[in-house]
Image: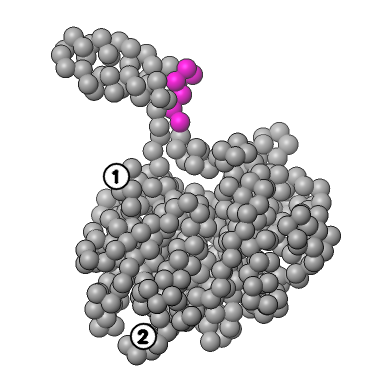
Amino acid sequence: MRNVVVVDGFRTPLCKEGTDFRETDADVLGAWVVREMITRCHRWNLPLETIDCVIGSNVATPTHAVNPTRVAAVTGGLPMTIPADTVAGKNCGSGVTALYYASLRIRSGDVDTALVIGMEAMSRIPIAYHYKAADLLMRYGKARSFGERIAAARSLIPALLNLKKYPPRIGLVLGLTDPMCDLIMGLTAENIAKDPALGITREDQDAFSVRSHKNAAQAWKDGIFADEVVPMYVPERSNYVGKDNGIRDDAGPETFSHVKPVFDRRHGSVTPANSSQITDAAAAMLLMEESKAQALGLPILGYVKDYADFGFDPSCMGLAPVGAIAKVLAKTRMTLKDFALWEINEAFASVVLGISRILDSSSLMKHKFGGYGLTERLGEIPPNDLNPHGGAIALGHPVGVSGLRLAMTSLFELKRRNAERAMISACVGGGQGVAMILERR
């Protein structure tokens, strides 16, 4: 199997839902990063035809672009002869999975070069009408005569105004609700937070959230994100966006303590402040077979190595990365001590806290994963090596982009530390987890 290198990677700023990118569709965000990658290819004197395929990650598929990767690739300026596919079904793990699929095609010899992009416009997820109201809208639209329109309107207007009988369905809420356990993702996080075996308190979650914001704010202050973030011009607003806009510079012990639980208002501890932010963004990474990159004199940011995914109880989906991490460690015969850096997606504070505690406890591992054949403690993740520059709680979680962000943040940090190996991982709605090993030699 051939080695797969990352030539380069970058992302847009991560912008909270309803803010800077609120008027921009996912395929347009994707086209932005495609154009930026084309600019870099010209700088390297790399013909665009060198790119054999584009693999994208997008979860909230735009209704006007069912293969947004193809739309982004062509409208972004790549030749129409380059094929493109979109990974969507892995939800929050789609970005990691897209990287894996691209690396598989290169390893197998099917292609030599693959552009991987992620794009998510969560601000643009539509609201769906109740099906009966939708039927009346269709009837009104099909009316031929003035009389037919009046008759249709008499039925349609009361239906649209009667929100209790025909409530509109918010697409974002539908997408974040698991049909297998009928729980919105925040309630699956509550299941973890309320588990007495894990012992996660509200104070633990808020402290973790403060840490995420402080680390992210410090990273921007120190210029750390300058390597991976490309300012983007927003034509709809006639301005440039250059920085992640959800970070709380004032985060401290008292900042989040008064925020009320939102998923279980009476007995819960998961709040908007200790949950990831709903976010819009895009990202791109160029992957290539190692010897080809060397022959072309291209930079090598790092290597995409091994990957594993894991199926788990959907009602506690946030713990599934434990299984994925254990699986990839067993596959490679490595231990936690082999990794200088960990990036675990901060879907919720309770998720990362729960994962860390299980990995470091034989009793918890046996209790939670014994039925999957996992009974031994894997070890402690050093706090300074876990999400050292913040995570989705401070930066945001544009679901189709987060996997690429985890990967490029890890590779740039390995370069800064002159370290060798990182593990990235994410929980996946529906009861799955993904994990991937990245290296820098």
| Mark 2 crowdedness (10 Å alpha carbons): few <14, some 14-19, many ≥20 | some
Q: Is residue 84 visible?
A: yes
Q: Position of residue 104 (x, y in %)?
A: 46, 71
**Which of the numbered marks, if any, corresponds to residue 292?**
2
Magenta residue check for 366 = no
Q: Position of residue 376 (x, y in %)?
A: 80, 66
| Mark 1 crowdedness (10 Å alpha carbons): few <14, some 14-19, many ≥20 | few
Could you tell whether 326 is left or right of 394 in the image?
right
Which of the 4 image quadrants contains residue 41?
Answer: bottom left
> What is the span of residues highlighted in magenta in the rendered image?
163-169
Q: Which residue is mark 1?
A: 64
Q: Position of residue 382 (x, y in %)?
A: 71, 72
Task: Point out the residue furthest to the right here.
Answer: 363
Q: CA distance from mark 2 to mark 1?
A: 37 Å
Rendered residue at 34%/90% (across/down): 295
Q: Is residue 162 above or below residue 28?
A: above
Which of the 4 image quadrants contains residue 185?
Answer: top right
Between 239 and 11, the one nearer to me in the picture: 11
Magenta residue check for 165 = yes
- Of the two numbered discs 2 and 1 in the rendering, the one whose residue sits closer to the viewer: 2
What's the image's color scheme?
A: one colour
Rendered residue at 48%/57% (across/down): 94
Q: Is residue 441 above or below residue 139?
A: below
Could you tell whether 21 is left or right of 101 in the image?
left
Between 67 and 356, the one nearer to me in the picture: 67
Q: Amino acid at mark 1?
A: His
Could you tell whether 351 is left or right of 27 in the image?
right
Q: Is residue 209 visible?
A: no
